[in-house]
Image (cartoon, rainbow, N blue to C red):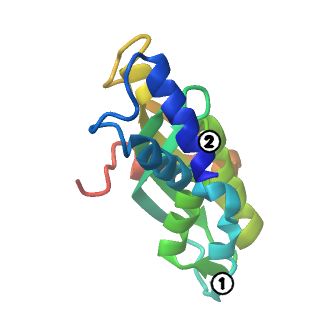
Amino acid sequence: MESEISEAVRAILRHVGDDPDREGLAETPRRVADAYLELTSGHDQDPGEHLRVTFTEDCDEMVVVSGIDFVSLCEHHLLPFIGTVAVGYIPEGKVVGLSKLARAVDILARRLQVQERLTRQIAETLVEHVAPKGVGVLVEANHSCMGIRGVRKPRALTTTSTLLGVFRTDAATRNEFLTLTRGNDGGR
């Protein structure tokens, strides 16, 4: 597959008027192929694999992990969008390792994506594998496709959320999650 991607990149370089064999570009097709294969490696992985191991815990208070950095590729332009994710859930007798939430986010982000779908997939994956009382996911990202081409607004921030279970049905729970996560940049 790497060779097919490399050949496609060579064709792009020719079509934009450059020589793919010149010194500065000679390794570019391979590098681009490696980058795209890395950035889309989540297609072959199951995010639920990291959420299968849970721990019985008498905890019924909200657990929130925020500031989970991610990079994903916009499926419309094959350009990156970069941002942070906050994941919150209320356990129903079992908790999951905190780093496992970040691993699941990474796998889902390493697919051709749109931010809206990524947000929903993170929440649904947690519901499916951990079965909490509720889940909230908040994603904030800057999109290269909007920042470096077209409208050229590089500082525009897109925010999406998915609220399931008690995060959707209980206003106090929803407000607590949004208060804990809005504007939280993970300590940066």
- Residue placed at 59% from the left, 77% from the top? 96
Q: Amino acid at mark 1?
A: Val
- Residue placed at 32% from the left, 23% from the top? 154
- Residue 97 is situated, as x and y percent measured from the top left of the image, at 53, 79
- Residue 145 is situated, as x and y percent measured from the top left of the image, at 46, 24
Q: Residues within 10 Å of mark 1 (few under 14, many from 20)?
A: some
Q: Residue furthest left?
A: 188
Q: Quadrant of residue 166?
A: bottom right
Q: Nearer the viewer, residue 111 or 185?
A: 111
SS for tag 1? loop
Q: Nearer the viewer, residue 105 or 55?
A: 105
**Which residue matches tag 1?**
53
Q: Is residue 75 visible?
A: yes
SS for tag 2? strand
Q: Quadrant of residue 125?
A: bottom right
- Residue 168 is situated, as x and y percent measured from the top left of the image, at 68, 46
- CA distance for labels 2 and 1: 27 Å
For marks 2 and 1, give the one nearer the viewer.
2
Instruction: Look at the numbered discs 2 and 1 and tell me whether their residues touch, using CB distance below 8 Å.
Output: no
Compared to residue 98, the image places residue 123 above or below, namely above
Q: Nearer the viewer, residue 57 or 156?
A: 156
Q: Residues within 10 Å of mark 2 (few under 14, many from 20)?
A: many
**Which residue matches tag 2?**
112
Q: Is residue 11 left or right of residue 188?
A: right
Q: Residue furthest top?
A: 151
First-in-chain label (2 vs 1): 1
Q: Residue furthest front?
A: 21
- Residue placed at 54% from the left, 73% from the top? 100
Compared to residue 117, the image places residue 122 above or below, namely below
Q: Amino acid at mark 2?
A: Leu
- Residue placed at 67% from the left, 64% from the top? 45
